[in-house]
Image: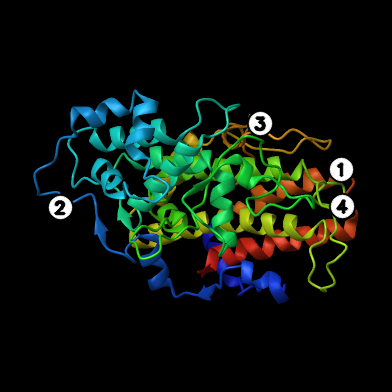
Amino acid sequence: MTDGGAAQDTATAATDGRGGRWARLRRHRLPVSAGVLALLAAGTAVPLALAGNEDEPCREIPAATRALAADPAAATRALDPGDDLSRMDAVRAVLRYDNPCGDGAKVLGEAVEAATLASGPGTPHTLAQARAAYGVAAALDGADLPGGMAPGIARMLADYVVDEARYLAHSDQAEGPAVPAGAAAPDPLGWTPYGRFLAPGEAHADFEYEQPYGDAEADPEQLVAELAEDPEAFAILYDAERAYLAHYLERLTRQGGDPGFRPDPKEKSEYARTATTWPDNDLEDIAERIGNLMKHRAAHAREGTTGDLAAYDGTVRRHTRGAYLAAPRRVTARPPMAAVAARPVSGPVRGDLTDGRHQMFTTFDAWARQRAVPDERAAAMRQIIDDAYVRGLWMRF
């Protein structure tokens, strides 16, 4: 069996191993039974049926909504919930349909792409686009997506792969659905809560934000669980995570550290950040999300929602772009998030595509070898990645 199932014999509840004030930045993870996991992966934790009963009459998508797929500016306006989320009901009205007729679900996904995706790989997201990404995630929170919509939603999350990563890190400082580029800029010590190696001038969706006394909440992880039922959507998300791993590694120092880190002379805590603290956390998040994808794939297979697993995996492979390797020398460019998802492949996938551990280590080991990373540091990073991958397979928030 592939890694999504074979890891069960050896998987253990890995712990973070970091204490003190940095521990609060990690969500608490709890073990989950196979039955509960299947419910989570099926998106039934919060019942919200968008697909409707097959026996019910379908609903036509209005012409105005169809037009959004071809008009990015109008689509962004339609799906932007506003800084205060006052337009969330309007966003839900555009996206939530019971049993859309014909190609309606696909059109809804295309409207989401038009509203949220950058205009090109080299173009940063605007603040309105980032707010719209939050609005879409919040509007679809707990949703059972109608068939055909998933690939468009997956492309949106892939376009915000760095921001989706931050969702796992958990911050209690989120102040709105998105932040302008200036708010995400590194401080004099090289620190920003929005991630490492950010493109200047790019706004960021803040999926951590929860509206006080409101009902809007974005949960990318639950959304990914639902999207994973669709093999094309799975391939899009898996490509983005593997591309992000290569993108991230090639920007680290030979010691696996953040080249922009500056020590704080006032910091006396034993848990003070070092140049490797946040790279280790970021690599954990990437590996955990890849593990999550394999967890959801296995859960959907157990529930029978994906049909024949071999056929599902074959479709995933057909939609997968290829393998991703880091550059042999350190890269200093800071491209926008859309460029991460659109990263050129390094060649065809080798080995079992759904063995996430193998695919990650193929990228990591090549990077460590080419950059002559010290053996002790490489081994520590490899263990961090492996532990997080296993945790993603068998743990939940």
The three-letter amino acid code for the residue at tag 3 is: Gly
Mark 2 against mark 4, which lies toward the viewer? 4
SS under mark 2: loop
**Residue that label 4 marks:** 255
SS under mark 4: loop
Q: Distance between the residues labelled 3 and 2?
A: 43 Å
* Marking on residue 53: 2
SS under mark 1: loop
Residue 19 can be seen in this image:
no
Extreme residue in the top direction: 70
Residue drawn at 34 percent across, 66 percent down: 45
Pointer 2: residues within 10 angstroms few (<14), some, or many (20+)? Answer: few
- Residue 150, given in percent of the width and then of the height, sits at 37, 43
Q: Relative to 124, say whether 281 is above or below.
A: below
**Residue that label 1 marks:** 371
Residue drawn at 38 percent across, 72 percent down: 35
- Residue 299, given in percent of the width and then of the height, sits at 42, 61
Q: Which of 152 and 385 is in front in this view?
A: 152
The three-letter amino acid code for the residue at tag 4 is: Gln
Q: How far apart are marks 4 and 1 (CA)?
A: 9 Å
User: Which comes sooner in the sequence, label 1 or label 3?
Assistant: 3
User: Which comes sooner in the sequence, label 3 or label 2?
Assistant: 2
Q: Report the label total.
A: 4
Pointer 3: residues within 10 angstroms few (<14), some, or many (20+)? Answer: few
The three-letter amino acid code for the residue at tag 2 is: Asn
Marks 4/1 in contact by CB < 8 Å: the verdict is: no
